[in-house]
Amino acid sequence: MNHIPLGIYRHYKGNEYEVLGFSKHSETLEDMVIYRALYSDGGIWVRPLSMWDNPIEKDGRTVKRFEYIGSNNNNTELAEAHRALLSTLQKCEKIDLDNLATSQRTLLERRIAALKIALGLIDKEMEKILRQ
């Protein structure tokens, strides 16, 4: 799915964004790109991968909608860790707790709580890096 690298991209209109990870649309299962605006107040956005790669006509020529301009080494490792932890969390949350023994359920609930804490800490660290 994620054949585009994590890192910094320049939109054809000039603003810069950082690709944080990838996801699937919950209804259509379409591949999505999760990215953060690196201007103004920022904000986290999602866009279909097909639109990310879709070329644009500008001033009579075809250009990339988003042009890769480099990695953000500080943030890229955190983004990759975030993606891996989020994937694990999503898999854990799909497990039917009613089919587990009490000790297995408790262990799974604690793992889910720990994954959520870790994801929150990574989010905070990534925001600190972006503010620097």
Image (cartoon, rainbow, N blue to C red):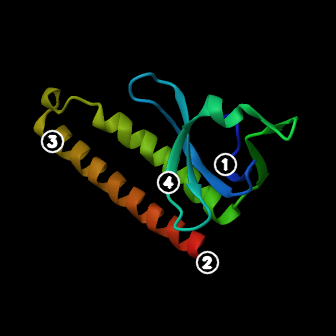
Please give left or right for residue 50 compared with residue 110 in the image: right
Pointer 3: residues within 10 angstroms few (<14), some, or many (20+)?
few
Q: Identify the residue under disc 2.
A: 132
Pointer 1: residues within 10 angstroms few (<14), some, or many (20+)?
many
In the picture as drawn, the residue positioned furthest to the top comes out as: 28
Give the Cα distance between marks 4 and 1: 14 Å
Pointer 4: residues within 10 angstroms few (<14), some, or many (20+)?
few
Of residues 23 and 50, the one drawn nearer to the viewer in this rendering: 50
Image x and y of residue 69, in percent: 79, 54
Q: Point out which mark residue 14 bears.
A: none
Please give left or right for residue 44 compared with residue 105 in the image: right
Give the Cα distance between marks 3 and 2: 44 Å
Q: Identify the residue under disc 3.
A: 103
Instruction: Identify the residue at horizontal 74%, vertical 56% (top origin).
Output: 14
Give the label, 4 or 1, closer to the camera. 4
Amino acid marked by disc 1: Leu
Sequence order check, earlier mark of 1 and 3: 1
Q: Identify the residue under disc 1.
A: 6
Image x and y of residue 89, in percent: 37, 43
Give the label, 4 or 2, closer to the camera. 4
Sequence order check, earlier mark of 4 and 1: 1
Instruction: Identify the residue at horizontal 11%, vertical 39% (top origin).
Output: 102
Of residues 97 and 4, the one drawn nearer to the viewer in this rendering: 4
